[in-house]
Image (spheres, coloured by chain):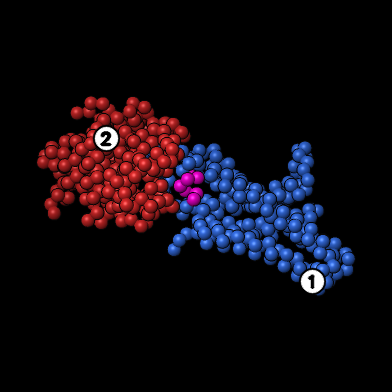
Chain colours: A blue, B red
Amino acid sequence: MNVLTDNLPLFGEGFLGTVELTVYSSLLALALGFLMASFRVAPVASLRAVGTVWVAVLRNTPLTLLFFAVLLGLPRFGLVLPFKVFAVLALGCYTSAFICEALRSGINTVPRGQGEAARSLGMTFGQTLTLVVLPQAFRSVIPPVGSTLIALAKNSAIAGAFSVTELLGTYKTLGELGYDVVWTFVWIALGYLVVTLAISALFTALERTWGVAR
Amino acid sequence: MAVDPLIELRDVNKYYGDLHVLRDIDLTVGKGEVVVIVGPSGSGKSTLCRTINRLETVESGTVALDGRPLPEEGRALARLRAEVGMVFQSFNLFAHRTVLQNVSLAQVKVRGRKKGEAERRSRELLDRVGLAAHADKYPAQLSGGQQQRVAIARALAMDPKALLFDEPTSALDPEMINEVLEVMRQLAREGMTMVVVTHEMGFARSAAHRVVFMADGRIVEDRTPEEFFTNPHSDRAKDFLSKILKH
């Protein structure tokens, strides 16, 4: 039980590491997911192809493999960055594929005529998407995007295996110090709960404000 | 009659897979002309209407507006589309915006008008279609006829050179059809160039300069309403008229 109180700084550091990974990767995933979703519905065939390949590759690669590819592969091409940045890249790109598909399913819920009306008024593709289609799609994608970001928070544990400071990784140090592994994991699990419940609270609030009125 | 051609379609062909929906369409609409397109369902009337602002692409042939051929995609196409208003069967008002915002949005974003100026123009147009009191409502709070009149105001707000109507009254309750047709008649009287796909033969008779009869993707007849309704040439048109005018 006293494993938490004895090692508060260590837990705190790990917890902050997880929060940081989650926040930065989420931002990257949302930005890239938004971009790729726009590509996938674009009138230009080459952009659609880029979006499709992006989703196919990243969604179908095991995340651990992707971490290996980024952490070991990119330095070979002369790109050397802190491990934490690599971890954010891997997590963000991986999750962006799922965000992209969630956004696209939302875009598909908006009746075709909405986009046609916007285009017939002379709006460009970008204006049609950002002024008419996405604001309506946004309402229906709040729940699936929330789930995807919760999955991202939990997936960040893999970064610990690549010597990035995060919550799960603390168990190694604590195990070596001789603490009971069960209690260590209970506190770690609670730490993850704090992060994931915070994300779901945020998305519940978003849904209450912006969700589809029924 | 066609003094100054505004909309010109030449040898337009369109396929949906193997289905040949538009066959060698030639159509010229002059400035100020009201052309009503009639025909049995599946004859390609709506598709024809939608090719004029390239909501439907065509496999061959050219579509030109005011002498300029429609570009494939991108900003140039968007600019030309702004010159042609479109009114849809299902209204397609932006569901997340109020009536006023629906009419103002493209004025600000496409025409680059100031917000205040756009809203003044919007209220003017809403007043003209008899809906000034509903400016702050959302589309879902209006009846079908009211929504369609907002859609007409939204199209007019761009100061278009022509208006396309794709079965504007087909989704309306019978008692609301007239309020929409009345607005359209008024526009026709004021000299707006209009292409109207409709089943309202009364409107075709009273407001159209020309009636275009389509069947199986072809233009079968293209004549004045008087001639078309009293003395149709083709058997296809005679058959069509006998079915719809009897009761």
Q: Which mark is residue B3?
A: none
Residue at the outermost bottom position: A1
Instruction: Identify the element where label 2 is drawn.
Output: strand
Nearer the observer, A46 or A196: A196
Residue A183 is marked as 1
Percent from the top left, x then y, of residue B144?
30, 54
Establish if B132 lies above or below A180: above
The residues colored magenta run A129-135
Tell which subunit mark 2 falls on.
Answer: B
Residue holding disc 2: B193
Please determine if labels 1 and 2 lie on a single subunit. Answer: no
Amino acid type for the residue under numbered disc 2: Thr
Q: Nearer the viewer, residue A191 or B100?
A: B100
Identify the image quadrant of residue B142: bottom left
Question: Residue A39: x and y, percent?
Answer: 54, 43
| Towards the viewer: B117 or B175 | B117
Circle count:
2
Identify the residue shown where x is 30% and y is 50%. Answer: B131
Residue A159: x and y in percent read 75, 54
Tell me if residue B68 comes above or below residue A79 in the rendering: above
Label 1 to label 2, Cα distance in Å?
78 Å
Residue at 43%, 46% (x, y): give it.
A115
Pointer 1 local density, CA inside 10 Å: few below 14, some 14–19, many at least 20: some
Q: Which chain contains the residue that carries disc 1?
A: A
Instruction: Please give the name of the residue rendered at 20% of the width and 38% of the height, measured from the top-left corner.
Output: B189
Left or right for A141, reference A118: right
Q: Secondary structure at mark 1?
A: helix
